[in-house]
Image (cartoon, grey):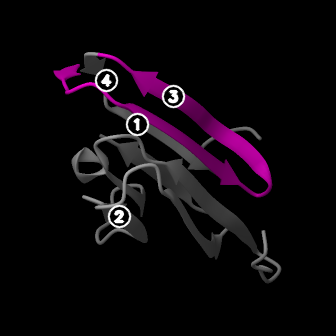
């Protein structure tokens, strides 16, 4: 965990219409999280073609949006397929989505 100034953060990530992680933090410590999803697990407005699923990321920023960085990447590959961070607007909600192949394993990290 890392020390952080007071403030709140909330995030939700969905894959193929289902939530893969939804968490909120406030207070003095924030523990960066990493979540795997896609074919590596058992289990919008953008329409994906057959063979692809929708990856959708929604993050509600708190009082210190400039401290937030996140990314999604295919496991063991670079570059990121989605990423964002170091925002300027307090309390803003970030929404990103992309279609990616079903037969892949993805990694979501926020810190």
- Residue 50 position by quadrant: bottom right
In the rendered image, which residue does mark 2 sit on? 84
Tell me the tag on residue 90: none
Asked which secondary structure carries label 4, the reply is: loop
Give the number of marks: 4
Q: Position of residue 75 (x, y in %)?
A: 41, 55
- The residue shown at (30%, 60%) is 87
Mark 4 or mark 1, whichever is nearer to me: 4
Establish if 51 lies above or below 14.
below
In the rendered image, which residue does mark 3 sit on? 24
Secondary structure that dominates the magenta span: strand
Task: Reply yes or no: does residue 32 show up in magenta.
Answer: no
Report, in whole angstroms, how far the alpha carbon at label 2 lies from the one at label 4. 18 Å
Asked which secondary structure carries label 1, the reply is: strand
Instruction: Tell which circle, 3 or 1, labels the residue nearer the N-terminal end.
Output: 3
Q: In this orientation, which residue lies closer to the viewer: 75 or 79?
A: 79
- The residue shown at (20%, 27%) is 5
Instruction: Tell which circle, 2 or 1, labels the residue nearer the N-terminal end.
Output: 1
Report, in whole angstroms, how far the alpha carbon at label 3 lies from the one at label 1. 14 Å
| Disc 2 crowd, CA 10 A, few/some/many (<14, 14-19, 20+) | some
Q: Position of residue 69 (x, y in %)?
A: 29, 52
- The N terminus is located in which quarter? top left
Tell me the tag on residue 31: 4
| Disc 4 crowd, CA 10 A, few/some/many (<14, 14-19, 20+) | few
Q: Which residues are magenta?
A: 1-27
Report, in whole angstroms, how far the alpha carbon at label 4 lies from the one at label 1. 10 Å
Q: Is residue 69 visible?
A: yes
- The residue shown at (57%, 61%) is 104
Q: Is residue 102 visible?
A: no
Report, in whole angstroms, how far the alpha carbon at label 2 lies from the one at label 1. 15 Å
In the rendered image, which residue does mark 1 sit on? 34
Q: Is residue 36 left or right of residue 48?
A: left
């Amino acid at each position: 965990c890392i020390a952080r100034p007071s403030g709140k953060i909330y995030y939700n990530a969905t894959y193929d219409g289902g939530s893969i992680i939804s968490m909120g933090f406030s207070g003095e410590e924030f523990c960066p999280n990493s979540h795997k999803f896609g074919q590596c697990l058992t289990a919008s407005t953008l329409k994906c073609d057959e063979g692809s699923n929708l990856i959708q990321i929604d993050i509600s920023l708190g009082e210190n949006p400039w401290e937030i960085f996140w990314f999604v990447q295919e496991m063991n590959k670079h570059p990121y397929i989605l990423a964002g961070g170091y925002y300027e607007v307090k309390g803003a909600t970030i929404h990103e989505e992309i279609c990616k192949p079903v037969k892949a394993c993805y990694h979501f990290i926020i810190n």
